[in-house]
Image: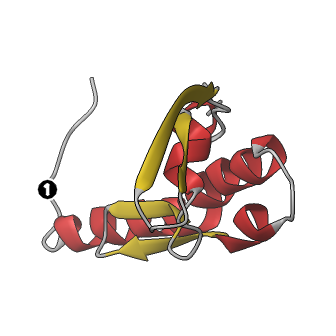
Amino acid sequence: MGEFREVAGWQAHVAVSKRELLEAKLCPAILADMVGGVPVDSGELRDSLDFEVIGDDVGRIGSRDAKHSGPVEEGHEIVYRDANGAKVHTGRMVPAQPYMKPALYRKRGG
């Protein structure tokens, strides 16, 4: 039968391993899937996608600059401003083009 011994400082090793996993494997894999799945018009949204690891166990992936990343993912109504600057809601919708959720929820091995 096996034996278990707790090694002093084990928590720090686990935290480093989680951060290394996020930086080296998980975040780059999700980012690559997002880049591969994002619809491209001008390329601004695709080129703005990036990731960062915060602390030992949080990764953020997406765009800080492209304000249309959410509307592309979720869909949106076409709205414009008239000659007086008032918003005009057309009632016409641009369908969702998901690229973030499919990348995030993709089953990954190992």
Q: Which residue is mark 1?
A: 6
Vertical order, 100 against 52 (above or below): above
From the top left corner, tell me how far across and down residue 92 is, in percent.
Answer: 59, 26
Tag 1, which secondary structure? loop
- 96 and 78: which one is in front? 78
Quadrant into which the C terminus falls: top right
- 101 and 14: which one is in front? 101
From the top left corner, tell me how far across and down residue 31 is, in percent.
Answer: 66, 56
Describe residue 37's horizontal placement relative to residue 51 as left or right: right
The answer to whether residue 100 of the structure is visible from this angle is no
Q: Residue at x 42, y 54 (%)?
A: 87
Q: Residues within 10 Å of mark 1 (few under 14, many from 20)?
A: few
Query: Residue 86 appears in which quarter of the rendering?
Result: bottom left
Q: Residue at x 64, y 26 (%)?
A: 95
Vertical order, 81 against 19 (above or below): above
Quadrant into which the N terminus falls: top left
From the top left corner, tell me how far across and down residue 69 is, in percent.
Answer: 57, 55
Looking at the picture, which amino acid does disc 1 mark?
Glu
Q: How many labels were placed on the picture?
A: 1
Describe residue 10's horizontal placement relative to residue 29 as left or right: left
Describe residue 14's horizontal placement relative to residue 90 as left or right: left
